[in-house]
Amino acid sequence: MMIGGKDLVIATPMSPETQVLFMTRYLRHLWGNVVIEHDGAELFCYPSEEAKQAWDNDCNDDYEMVHLLPCDGCLTIVHEKLDEDEVRNNFNANRCFA
């Protein structure tokens, strides 16, 4: 699987677990039936099972995927189409959950 896209790094006091909960809720709101694949500390999020299968088969040109890399102090989000300002604003608005 070849991952490209833009890196959005968000400094946050949220724990890695809270970062993941927050982003998966955000993606569920955005996509509805988000499919989440865990690979150690990394997460791969797809808007559908069809999109996940396309990525698994390297036929991903038409399908979006978000790669989450949570760690202490920041969350890196690798993406193609997310509204970065919206994601940042949502993190800033929810700092009380850190």
Image: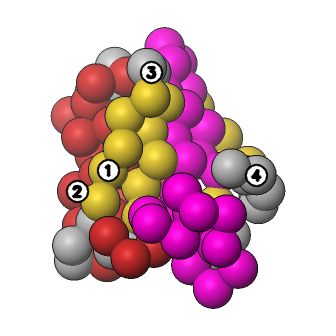
11 left or right, relative to 94:
right
Q: Position of residue 54 (x, y in %)?
A: 53, 71
Q: CA distance from mark 4 to mark 3?
A: 18 Å
- For the residue pair 26 and 34, the one nearer the viewer reads as 34
Three-letter residue code for mark 1: Ile
Q: Position of residue 51 (x, y in %)?
A: 45, 73
Three-letter residue code for mark 4: Met
Please say whether residue 19 is one of the residues in the magenta stretch: no
Mark 3 surroundings: few (<14), some (14-19) or many (≥20) residues within 10 A: few
Render colour scheme:
secondary structure
Q: Is residue 89 above or below residue 8?
A: below
Q: Are marks 1 and 2 in contact (CB under 8 Å)?
A: no
- The numbered dot on residue 25 is 2
Residue occupying the far bottom of the picture: 62
- The numbered dot on residue 36 is 1
Residue 84 appears in the figure: no
Q: Position of residue 69 (x, y in %)?
A: 54, 32
Q: Looking at the image, is mark 1 or mark 2 earlier in the sequence?
A: 2
Look at the image and give the residue range highlighted in magenta: 52-78
- At 67% from the left and 63% from the top, the residue drawn is 58
Q: Are marks 2 and 3 in contact (CB under 8 Å)?
A: no
Residue with the mark numbered 4: 2
Residue with the mark numbered 3: 41
Q: Position of residue 4 (x, y in %)?
A: 78, 56
Three-letter residue code for mark 3: Ala
Q: CA distance from mark 2 to mark 4?
A: 25 Å
Three-letter residue code for mark 2: Arg
- At 21% from the left and 73% from the top, the residue drawn is 33
Q: Looking at the image, is mark 2 or mark 4 earlier in the sequence?
A: 4
Q: Is residue 41 above or below residue 66?
A: above
Task: Indicate which label's residue lies in the foreground, 4 or 3.
Answer: 4
Mark 2 surroundings: few (<14), some (14-19) or many (≥20) residues within 10 A: some
